[in-house]
Amino acid sequence: MPNEAFFLEVGPFCIVPVCHHRMEFAHEVERVFRAVRPNRVAIELAPFLLEPLKTAVRRFPRLTNLAYEATTEPTKPAVWHLLAVEPTDAFAEATRLALFHELPVHAIDLPIHYPHEHQDWVPDSASLTAIGLKAMYELWCEKMGSATVSAEDQAREATMAHALLNLKRMNPEQKFLVVVGMAHAARLAEYLEAEDAPLRPPPPFEHGEVELYEPDIETVRMSHSEAPWVMALYEFRRGGPGDDKYWQPPPAPEVEPEDPRDRLKNVDPGKVVASLEMMLGMRRRRPQPMEKKERKALSRYLQGLQEDPGAFMQLLNQFGAGSLPEKVNLPEVKAPSQRFQAFKFKEVNDRRADLRGLYGAVLEESGQSLDRQLMLEALMRTTGHYYQENTGDHLASWQFKTLYQYVRNYAHLHGRLLPSIYELTMGARGVADDNWAYEVWDLGTFYPWSPEPEGESDLPLMNISDDKLWLGGREVVSWQFRRRQPSLRRMRKRAKEDEARDWAEEFEGGGICSYPAEDLVIEDYARYLQKKAIQQMSSEKTRIEPFTTSLMDGIDMRETLRNWHERKLFVRDIRRVAGGVGAVIVVFDEDKNDDRYPWRMTWHGEHSQESDMAFYATPVNTKLVGPGISRCEYGGLLMTYPNRRLENIWADPSYAELRSKSEVLLMGALEYGLDRHVVYVSASPPRSHFRSVAARLGKRIVYLPIGSLSPQSIQKIRVFHVLSDHQKRKIAKDYIW
């Protein structure tokens, strides 16, 4: 049975065959320990690493890397070797159990260089959940039992057998839990059963003192063998959440309320007086022009006066009927309410307060079982929610289905059942974009108990950056470590808290414009919808009939093959559609509650190649991604041709009785569209009332279900950006993703 504890029992020795740095094997060691209740624990480890390993295990859930200089050839210089101590490693778990139960721990291996890049050809550890350790070990013995054994492995196994036999003679009547690699378990059992093993000379190996370092979060992301997401869930189940300080998000910087007068300190008082006199109609000559920053400072101060009538009257009283003050005493006013907010791209470090609940929910959903498949599925589902929160884009069910099929095939190519974080990251980028890939990488490689690069630790910090190793501030040139996980290049700029106000001020001028690159995309897609509608209407009028005297519009091969028994040719007669398409409507969300897309706008095309547009969308002040750059999302839009004709349909009183914003767009299309046909794309067709209205106006509504269109194309045009002025078009590419 998969849930039964499996081990090779040879006298007092209970041998557990494991693989390094895999969560399922650590769980198997815990299960065997509970079943056997040993008196002593022996692990496959060099004796000089035992005490540092114990120190590292006592630090869990904090991670520790053991570092030491060693060489296998006296003529060559020593190289730094690194050994990661992870809670999901079987040897670390055996040591942890022994220390908790106050049992002796013995290191029985030879002092050698452990090849961390070596990979045993064993079944995927994820299969342990279904078949158990016994079936996996038997399968491995069947496939790899006849493999050639190296001289180094023979020396190691003989040494481990002699060490265990000596322990048995010194501690009779005691039971030993022996944790060794799967490749050594069978031969070690044979040596123990025979109670003899031919000792061989150990390979040359010289090492220095072992030093302990704590890897920072960036090092954990790039270099650890087990996925940090899996390590975090295992440790959360094994040892609990730990100190509350690990679940606190980084403190937000304190922003003191701004006094609007502060910005006028650097403005020439004469310019302030002259500008106020000009606005009050008390100055005949035009004042000296003010710079842009000076105009913004004065504008912000005047906005504060609007909310404080008393201060406004105090300012006016300084401008008497017959006197002009040389200097104005600016009364104190409150800062205007912040109408804009910068959009902050949340990373997993900003969500620390939610991670404790997330880990608990994932484990509760899986019934506290350590099922890697459920863990990875929860990872993708959670990052899908984060992706929607950060970008506004929605992931469809077909994208998850395609992703799972892709990563399954990718894992099979490497002989595994389940994918790694790398494969999930690349799969997310393939079915969606780099933003979802970054979410997967960010959460999948995050270990909540790791310090930041400049964080506090009781050990010197280890950092790997740009292929350089830093140990406690010292750069190490020659070193060996296991394969590094590839990271994604961040493509987005994050707003700083103190930049939000400056970014918002760019919109105070009142002028807005679109981003040309997005204009081209949406105009091209509208033309595609026009052609698709014409093709649909043409196909509805197409007739198939037997060939008589004319081939008409060509032979219909499908109908001909279907009726081939009649020995007749069938031809296609395509009826042409009279009239073109004068308006296109795309409804992403009906928004019948009128709360998600409150911003309603009508704007005209800048040149003859652009259409007029009316739309309802998310407010322009909710997601600032750059200076004067706001990220918005359409709820629905209307595009009419030619341009410079569309009135403000949102202010038209004749539309007041319509039931929804999408009906306002449709009515505007019927009234302002010049051509006969109107394309209506939505999840549901319009009311029959509008077909009657269209018939009276000599129009026809062509309905296209939004589900029949490419979801990727729909998502591509749904998000757009609003710029505060045309000058922002030069820098928009640096902030738009």
Image (cartoon, grey):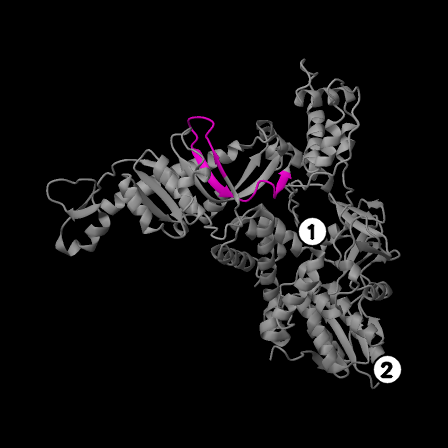
Q: Nearer the viewer, residue 158 or 336?
A: 336
Task: For marks 2 and 1, give the CA distance.
Answer: 43 Å
The spot of residue 713 in percent (x, y) is 46, 44
Residue, far bottom? 173
Q: In this rendering, is residue 203 above or below 656?
A: below
Q: Nearer the viewer, residue 438 or 187?
A: 438
Task: Count neighbours of disc 2 (C-alpha within 10 A) and say few if under 14, some if 14 to 19, many if 20 or more.
Answer: few
Q: Is residue 516 left or right of residue 235?
A: left
Residue at point 24% right, 51% down?
558
Residue, far top? 285
Q: In this rendering, is residue 364 above or below 4?
A: above
In magenta segment, residue 610: yes
Mark yes or no: residue 536 visible.
no
In magenta segment, residue 707: no
The spot of residue 701 in percent (x, y) is 32, 44
Q: Which residues are magenta?
A: 601-625
The spot of residue 336 in percent (x, y) is 69, 38
Tag 2 secondary structure? loop
Residue at image mark 2: 171
The spot of residue 631 in percent (x, y) is 58, 41
Q: Quarter of the image holding residue 233?
A: bottom right
